[in-house]
Amino acid sequence: MRSRLPTRSVGAASAAPADPGVDPPRLDESHDPSKARGEAGRRGGPAWNHPPAARPGRAALAVLAATAVLLVAVIAGIAIGPVAVPLGAIADTLAAHLPWHPPVSVPPLDSAIIWQIRLPRVVLGALVGSMLAGGGAAYQGVFRNPLADPYLLGVAAGAGLGATAVIISGGSLALLPVAAFGGGVAAVAITYSLGARAGQHNDDPALHGAAGTASILLAGIAVAALLTAAQTFLQQAHSQTLQSVYAWILGGLSNATWSQAWLLTPYVLVAGLALFAHRRLLDVLRVGETEAGALGVNVPRLRLVVVIAATLGVAAAVSVSGLIGFVGIIVPHIVRLTAGASYRIIVPVSMIGGAAFLILADIAARTVQPDTEVPIGVITAAIGAPFFLFVLRSRRARADAS
Amino acid sequence: MIGVDDLRVSFGSTAALDGVSVRVATGEWVALIGPNGAGKTTMLRAIAGMARSAGGIVLDGRPARQLGHRRLARLIAYVPQHPVLPPEMTGLDYVLLGRTPHLGYFAVESGADRRICLELLDRMALADMAGRRLATMSGGEAQRLVLARALAQQAPILLLDEPTSALDLGRRVDALELIDELRRERSLTVLSAIHDLTLAGQFADRLVLLRSGRVAADGEPATVLRDELLSDAFGAGVGVLRTTNGELAVISHRQRQAAR
């Protein structure tokens, strides 16, 4: 074989760059029809003008579909409730709040229900849902772990401890979101610095001396357990406030106001844009941290930036809504199974879909029982789990059939 | 060009590389051979900047340690022995990952990037794989796809860790022929670890025999593939045969006679 090489190589070296008509010898597989198409492409009409996977189109389609669902959810969220509101009144009320609006007259009761009660709740649900689902998608990507949810690094435990501290101390309820936000962010900061320090003893050189994901995840479990223990202790020691602490922990949107929505909006915008901007790099991480590093990605820095963005968004969401579970883990997976496994799809579509999902769950939470609200976390799990299993099953069936 | 001078890597107190010096000229193919644990993979990872090391590494005249992640990835394409192949990813998306070092932090691939990758798929006889999921690909297809991703980096240096370990004998020869063609076509500098000594001797310009983190022999295949050198390094009876058309074949001897 060595004796054969020179003749082959002369052909290859001279032919390939200069004269595309003469082909260097190829592998056996290159004699199949795909080669013929390839040759045609190189000479004349490029074969790559019509790649089979038109990815940008696919992502756009998924975003469009999710947006349509969100729109329906928003309208349903405003229309459905103890008092049914006609669609015309919704349109008129919204129009009346435009800067230069046509003269419209809406019955004041309808207007108040729509603008003061339903709409802030719908908007807040959308903002919270988008952050929980977007944060879950980001955590799943950056830790390459399908079980990751936005509470993985201790946000929920820290926020719960902060909220409990305010409630039992009888402090102003205006402090509650601040304490919850601070507790959540502090918990993740502790997790990250502990995990990163522990990781320096592990000798995986691919990470340039930074922590492996495993040590960060384990630190998250430890920090969450510790903070939850402290929270439970405080909660039990002040049993007179048990009810309100428990209600906050379960989460919900029943106290939604416009001011909460305005408070949350900048966090959602910054975190949402930051996560969206990292969608391609999250795709690079799909081949693992070692290979992503070899492709020129500074993995520890990428991980830190994504975790900071997701944590700010999730902590802000949790601070106004309490600990709504299940959205952050299930929505990204439904998107992955139905729309595609690329983070260019998962990140934006999870944020839009999470918003729609939480609005729909909230409709159920306030309507299934006539006189009281069901905790929204119960609904997200009760709707989400069967739907997720259905998607998983049909997906498996399709995969088996093909 | 790769210049490695007195390279040292240690894991805890054990030295994985203990003063290795090797030069690979531009356009040359050098194969690292040696027993398991001799330091082949460690050496490739150290050169690719993925293992903390001491000693000099010069790539195309530039000291590697002064290069950032991205600059390094534009100079070196590294293919690990077992690349991660996300099953749901399409062939084109996978090759596009190779463009990463050429893209800004928040940038996405341009039409030019897609064109480069589609041409590479075409060159690797993978034109039909652009839209197919990696889960559906054969071992040979996946191996060429990984190579296509490495070439999409447009780096002058290719580091390959056991590029053919997952392939049958026929596909192995195919893959190595392809690497050889691409190397000549693009003047690539190739440093690869190869387990199969016969194939290493057939394809590489030079062999570097590593043993316990040191260079035991460095030279043309005929000078390195010698009975006593190999038996010594591998700790087993190894014989080198010369075929009638001058090729070297390496075989192992059984330590005991087979029971008949």
Image (cartoon, coloured by chain):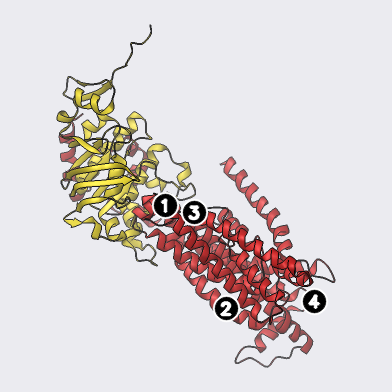
- The kind of residue on which mark 4 rests is Ala
Q: CA distance from mark 1 to mark 4?
A: 62 Å
Q: Nearer the viewer, mark 4 or mark 2?
A: 2
What hue represents chain B? yellow
A379 or A289, which lies in front?
A289
Q: Residues within 10 Å of mark 4 (few under 14, many from 20)?
A: few
Q: Which chain is red?
A: A
Residue A375 shown left or right of residue B184 in the figure = right
Chain ID of residue with mark 2: A
What secondary structure is found at the residue carrying circle 4? loop
Q: Position of residue B142 (x, y in %)?
A: 39, 42
> Would you place residue B44 above or below residue A321 in this image?
above
Q: Nearer the viewer, mark 2 or mark 1?
A: 1
Q: CA distance from mark 1 to mark 3?
A: 10 Å
- The kind of residue on which mark 3 rests is Ser
Chain ID of residue with mark 4: A
What secondary structure is found at the residue carrying circle 2? helix
Q: CA distance from mark 2 to mark 1?
A: 40 Å
Q: Which residue is mark 4?
A: A84
| Residue A397 image-quadrant placement | top right
What secondary structure is found at the residue carrying circle 3? helix
> Would you place residue B173 above or below residue A165 in this image?
above
Closer to the N terminus: mark 2 or mark 1?
1
Closer to the N terminus: mark 1 or mark 3?
1
Residue A209 shown left or right of residue A321 in the figure = left
Closer to the N terminus: mark 2 or mark 3?
3
Tag of residue A265: 2
Closer to the N terminus: mark 3 or mark 4?
4
- At horizontal 32% and vertical 16% (from top left) the residue drawn is B255
Tag of residue A201: 1
Q: Which residue is mark 3?
A: A215
Q: CA distance from mark 4 to mark 2?
A: 28 Å
